Structures are given as C-alpha cells and as structure tokens.
C-alpha cells in the first residue's frame, strides 16, 4: 500500500500507541483486500462498549474500558489508552436499554456499568446515538462523503438513499477509522463499483411498508451481494419504506447498494444506474415473488398463539411511532402478550414530550431503545412465539433465539398484540 508521510509516521508511533495499532490494523486490512491506499473518512458509526456478559466475562474489572477498546476495537493484545476520536463518531445499537433494562433481564449493576461506559467513551468523542438508524437522529452524511459504518441496514441506506460511500465495516476497522480518519479504498468507495449489475422489473407495485419490506427481501435473494436497479413505475417512497426495503435486502442477500432511478441518490435513469452496461442478470418481482417472500418469512412458524410482539427493526421513526400510538390509543393488549416498541433514545424523548409514549404504554406496551432482541437476545420470560413487522427480525430470530417468528404488517402485529393470536396474510 502507498502511505503518505503522515500515515507512515502514525504507523511508526509518532501519534501514540493507539493510533500506531490502528494504523497497523488498517494496513493489514487494506493489504488483505488488495487496496492500494488509505482514504480519508469524515464519519464513523460503530460499537465502543457493551455490557453484555459474553463481552466482559473474562475481565478482572468490568469497567476496564481501555482493555475493551484495545481488544475489540483495535484487535490489540496489549492495552492502550483510548484516545480522542479524530472524526465525527457515533455509537450504533448495543445490548441494553438503560431505562427498561430489567424487562430485558439485566441487573442494576449492568445498567450502571452501561451508563459509565457511555460517559467514558462519550468524553472521548463518541456520540451515543445508540441506534441502528443514526440517519434518523441527526447523523446524515451527504452525497459523496466517505464513511466507515457498521450495521448492514444503515450502510445500504447511506449508500443508496443518501449517496454517501461506505462498505459494511467491522468493529475493529470502524474503531481504527475513528481515531485515524482513514479506511482502505475498496468496494463502494470506488466509482466503478457503485453501478448496478442486475435489473429487477417490478410488477407487484409496493404500497405499504410491508410491501416494501417483502420486495426488499425478494430482491435480496435474487441478487445476493450484487447491486440491483429497480425498473417500473414505482410510487414515491417514504424514508421508512426505503429503510425497510434496504434492511430486508441486506438480510436475505447482503445488498449494500441499490438504485431506484429518479428516487435514490445516484441515478436518474436505468442507463445511468447501470453505467451504460448490460445487466448481468434480469429478474422479475411479481405477485408470485411477493407471496414467496411472505411464505419464506413465515416458514418456521405454525402456532398462532402469540407471546411477544416486537416492532421497530430498524428502529422506528417518529412517523412510525405516531402511527403505533394511534393504533393503540384507547386499547389494551392481551394479558398473554408482551409488546415492545423500539425506537432511538432521541426519538423516545420526542415521543415522551409529544405524548406518544403515554398513548403506547397505556395499552400495556413498552417503548424500548438502544437495542433489540436480535442484538441482546432478550425476550420476555416464557416467549415461544414472536410476531414482528420486520423482515430482518423474522429472518434472524428463529436462528438466534430458536423461537417461532411470524412476519406481518404493522396492523397484523397490533391485532396480534390485542387478541393474542396472529392472523396475518396477504
């Protein structure tokens, strides 16, 4: 790799041991990828601390945050002091909601440790967004900006919707990028790698959020890790539609970039999305593909008696929180069901002030933040059957938790929470 004089100096330790180890990690990473150089990044989203037991179980002191940072963010055997972030840096979703931690099965000590870690890393420049959707709480990069982001659903949104540039990074590379402002130049940082390779003709036109999720889940399975361009007369999507489309496509196929001509950031036409090239493959998303996606998402469930309803993956926007509040207002959920509604802590504060939280929690539901069952593996005691409006959760929870998981629309989920039975269908 070609390194600048400053990069060589950092690698030699001129800016301290932490940045030296970060540079060593980035150089090894870049060489493995075949990158020729490092490029500047201005925005990092990653993970700096977790109070979950499997991360800190072997530490003599669970609040030894420098050891956590050294091991898990720099892949270093020795311990270095955590330095200040060099570029704008935010914490993504993590393991514990410090307001509702008891519901998740965490102790007072673990919640206190989480708050302590937030202050420790926060004073070193980490903005504690605590969400898989940092773009919903103020971290909105601009078109062409180079990032180092973790979290597949955030990455595909940043690339496709915003036109920023990032690959799906890991905790180590994001941790190194935050204190150096550098990342290897490969993948979606390069112009030529951002063109569509596959075309999907949309015949089953999406209308609802569920439709956009099903289309994303189907398209992801069609193209896998490639880049699709959608053709056809698609309606103007809302941000929540694109959020769910991208999260579903990233779950079923590993999609990190897509194009909807005239609606996403980088193409006004199919030809522009394809870069003037012929697509490698052509696919059709029709009524049969829509039904197949719905059936695949519900293939592991057979018991309609519901224990747990989970809403908010990716985390709900304020618009979605109002819709949930409206649907629950004046109603009471079944005594046999727990309903958890997940949103970023910043949006929860807005819901608190706007009265949405009260409307939701009067029904017996709980407004949760900072985490989700796929991250912390926490569900109410006795949970065997789950209902969710998230393709991503429905895709992952059966394997992560070994529980039956139904997928349906928001309305299906609310009905299941109120009645204790899932009746969702197309």
Image (tube, rainbow, N blue to C red):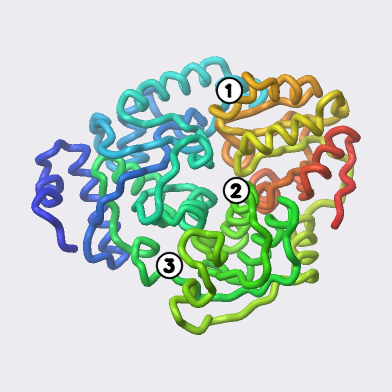
Question: In this rendering, which labeled residue sits more in front, label 2 or label 1?
Answer: 2
The residue that label 1 is drawn on is: 349
Q: Residue at x 24, y 31 (%)?
A: 83
Q: Residue at x 29, y 61 (%)?
A: 185
Question: In this rendering, which labeled residue sits more in front, label 3 or label 2?
Answer: 2
How many C-alpha atoms fall within 10 Å of the one at disc 1: few (<14), some, or many (≥20)?
A: some
Please give left or right for residue 140 compared with residue 229 in the image.
left
Q: Earlier in the sequence, mark 3 or mark 2?
A: 3
The residue that label 2 is drawn on is: 239
The residue that label 3 is drawn on is: 194
Please give left or right for residue 216 compared with residue 294 in the image.
left
Please give left or right for residue 348 compared with residue 127 in the image.
right
Q: Residue at x 20, y 41 (%)?
A: 19
Q: Residue at x 81, y 30 (%)?
A: 328
Q: Which mark is residue 340?
A: none
Quarter of the rendering containing residue 207: bottom right
**Badge 3 vs badge 2, beta-carbon distance below 8 Å:** no
Helix, strand or loop under label 2: helix
Q: CA distance from mark 3 to mark 2?
A: 21 Å
Residue 79, position as x, y percentages in the image = 25, 33
Residue nearest the viewer, comparing 67 with 237: 237
Residue that sits furthest to the bottom in the current view: 278
Residue nearest the viewer, comparing 238 with 210: 238
Residue nearest the viewer, comparing 265 with 281: 265
How many C-alpha atoms fall within 10 Å of the one at disc 2: few (<14), some, or many (≥20)?
A: some
Q: Quadrant of the C terminus?
A: bottom right
Q: CA distance from mark 2 to mark 1?
A: 21 Å
Residue 330, position as x, y percentages in the image = 85, 23
Please give left or right for residue 288 compared with residue 65 in the image.
right
Q: Is residue 397 above or below residue 376?
A: below
Q: Earlier in the sequence, mark 3 or mark 1?
A: 3
């Amino acid at each position: 790799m070609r390194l600048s004089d400053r990069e060589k100096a950092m690698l030699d330790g001129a800016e301290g041991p932490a940045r030296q180890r970060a540079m060593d990690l980035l150089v090894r990473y870049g060489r493995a990828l075949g990158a020729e150089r490092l490029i500047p990044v201005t925005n990092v989203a990653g993970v700096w601390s977790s109070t979950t037991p499997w991360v800190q179980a072997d530490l003599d002191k669970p609040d030894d945050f420098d050891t956590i940072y050294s091991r898990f963010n720099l892949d270093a055997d020795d311990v270095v002091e955590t330095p200040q972030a060099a570029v704008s840096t935010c914490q993504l979703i993590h393991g514990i909601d410090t307001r509702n931690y008891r519901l998740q099965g965490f102790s007072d000590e673990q919640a206190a440790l989480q708050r302590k870690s937030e202050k420790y890393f926060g004073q070193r420049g980490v903005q504690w967004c605590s969400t898989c959707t940092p773009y919903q709480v103020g971290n909105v990069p601009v078109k062409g900006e180079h990032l180092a982001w973790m979290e597949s659903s955030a990455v595909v949104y940043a690339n496709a919707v915003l036109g920023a540039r990032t690959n799906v990074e890991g905790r180590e590379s994001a941790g190194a990028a935050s204190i150096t402002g550098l990342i290897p130049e490969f993948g979606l940082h390069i112009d030529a790698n951002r063109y569509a390779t596959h075309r999907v003709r949309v015949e089953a036109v999406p209308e609802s959020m569920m439709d956009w999720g099903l289309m994303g889940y189907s398209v992801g399975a069609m193209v896998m890790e490639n880049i699709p361009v959608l053709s056809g007369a698609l309606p103007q999507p809302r941000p929540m539609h694109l959020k769910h489309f991208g999260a579903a496509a990233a779950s079923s196929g590993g999609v990190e970039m897509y194009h909807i001509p005239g609606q996403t950031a980088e193409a006004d036409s199919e030809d522009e999305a394809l870069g003037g090239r012929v697509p490698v493959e052509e696919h059709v998303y029709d009524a049969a593909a829509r039904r197949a996606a719905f059936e695949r998402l519900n293939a592991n469930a057979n018991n309609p008696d519901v224990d747990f309803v989970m809403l908010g993956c990716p985390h709900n926007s304020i618009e979605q929180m109002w819709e949930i509040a409206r649907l629950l207002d004046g109603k009471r959920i079944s005594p046999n069901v727990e309903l958890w509604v997940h949103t970023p802590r910043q949006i929860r504060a807005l819901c608190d002030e706007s009265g949405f939280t009260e409307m939701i929690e009067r029904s017996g539901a709980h407004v949760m933040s900072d985490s989700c069952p796929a991250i912390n593996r926490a569900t109410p005691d006795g949970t065997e059957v789950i209902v969710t409006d998230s393709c991503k959760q429905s895709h992952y929870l059966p394997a992560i938790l070994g529980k039956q998981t139904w997928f349906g629309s928001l309305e299906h989920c609310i009905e299941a929470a109120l009645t204790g039975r899932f009746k969702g269908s197309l």
